Image (spheres, rainbow, N blue to C red):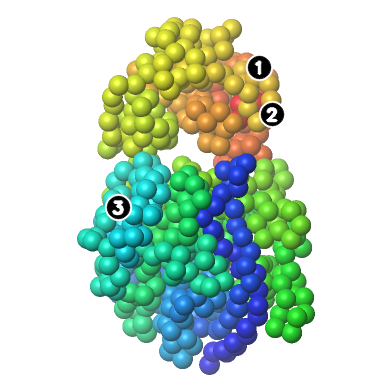
Amino acid sequence: MFRCALVALPTLLSVLPSILAQDTNLLNLTLVTTNITTVDIYYTPPQFLTNGTRLDGFVQPRQKRISYSDANGLAIIDGDIILTTVEDIQASTVQPSKIKPRGLNIPHSDSYRKWQAGIFVYKYETQELKDEKKEAFDLAIKLWKDMLPQLYFQEDGPPNNENTEDGGAITLRGSHAAPAYCKTCSFSPVGRAGWSDTSGNWHYSKKANQMILGPCYSLESCAGVYAHELGHSLGLWHEHMRPDRDDNVIVNCNSIEDGVDAKGVTVTPDCSDSDNCRIGGCAFVKKDPMDVDYSGPYDRNSIMHYYTTAFSKDGSKTISGKPPFADPRPGNKPTLLDAQKLCNLYWEVCRAVCGDGVLSPGEVCDDGNNIDGDGCSADCQSTGAGPVCGNGIIEPGETCDDGANNGKPGYSCGTNCHPVSPGGGGGRCTIQQCDPRPGYNKCDISTSCIKIEGSADTSRHLCACRHGFRGLGIDAGDTNGQARIPAARWPSQEGRVFVNPGSQCTQLCDGWTLGADGCTEVGELDTCF
């Protein structure tokens, strides 16, 4: 028998309002007071398959404790996630396997939750809402589609408030549909909302399959928040709740704001686990590794990550980088890793991520960014009138152009017509930049021109050696010829050596180990980040 414990506590729930910090690009969370219900349920764990097939058998249900708030009949978890309906959750306490939780990335075998053929279908509840939200929501779509042009976002007919049929559209609703405790918040399910019955059959939840769009304070801020919610609806979970997050960040539970229970007694947060979490601490609990797919590097810059002072009671950090890693820096745009996770999820249609600086099948061009008007469209699907780097003329989209001298020693302009600028530690990166565009890429065949994701210079590209190799004939300590970026700046790339365009990387490093901080004989340059 399962144990059912219903406990109602007024708590502080993290929500995602449609506003960004005025002086940063960080997502801004607000704390509000509401009731949390904790209940033991049965659910069906994911079937972990990687080849797109399905199991003939059925995975036996497991018991799990969840905490949710009731928002007009919707079960909200982790601040802005619509898990399913409260009715479905209540049914799962008396009938096994009523619901099935989602993970960071929906497993490939969970084809029912994925948007079929990578087509995200949506509709507005009313014409009035469409008139109000369309510009911001279209911009949010563009942020994802520019990076993942193989995905499609399709509006389904005229606005209406009718329930969608199985396989139908997600309904976009306004703040009137938000719970009373936060009318400025946005909410969405992870993937297509629904549940599995005792036989493993999938049932589409018409009521839960909706996205609530909070009010706009500026076009850019709204687009960032709606892009976050789109990330959920496409299949992404909160990054800071990954099972491996403790290897990358530190959750400072003592900094999370206290709450007050029904008797007026102060309740301190608990971040330990889902069975014991309290108040705002429930938004920082790690997910069960048996329930989620958390493949790929941890992304502290992810649009799905909490910022450093979320839930803070006094402005101190609730999340900080675990040394030697830097603090999280989530922004209002998806990162390359965000896009790659969705590309892996929708592997049937996605072949490449636009903006990674690598010309891949399905791309006409890839100049390492998602900006229109620079000679390669933001979605990598067309070339057109734009600046020609290297012609000695500073054109729109360029900040410098020294012609044939771009990237050469003694000249401040890089090969991508942006200055060889200071990195995170000040000073100057002595490694020359490369230009990933066909015809402009001067990296040796033994290297690759890659974008330095998260760099202070958002256009920075450097020639990267393969892991385990360094520059041929270059003194290991000569940071004018080769260098590494410190692990605290770019985790998972700490063993990577970067060289000047044209340099060969065919010399084995002295002490390189797979997955470790290898090639340590090569000097580090903080200024190249």
Q: Which one is earlier in the sequence, the residue at label 3 or at label 1?
A: 3
> Quick check: marks 1 and 2 in contact, CB under 8 Å?
no
Query: How many numbered discs sit on the rendered protein?
Result: 3
Q: Quadrant of residue 124?
A: bottom left
Amino acid found under the numbered disc labelled 2: Gly
| Extreme-front residue of the structure | 128
Looking at the picture, does residue 33 appear above or below residue 347? Answer: below
Amino acid under disc 1: Asp
Q: Which mark is residue 425?
A: 2
According to the image, label 1 marks what residue? 478
Which numbered tag is attached to residue 153?
A: 3
Relative to residue 92, is residue 291 depicted above or below?
Answer: above
Q: Is residue 89 left or right of residue 410?
A: left
Residue at screen point 59% across, 87% down: 6
Instruction: Find numbered disc 1 in the image and state the secondary structure of the residue it sits on.
Output: loop
Q: For this rendering, which residue is in front, 232 or 183? A: 183
Against 266, residue 283 (above or below) is above
Side of 362 relative to 331 (left or right): left
Q: What amino acid type is highlighted by mark number 3? A: Phe
Q: Residue at x 30, y 60 (%)?
A: 127
**Cβ–Cβ below 8 Å for labels 3 and 1?**
no
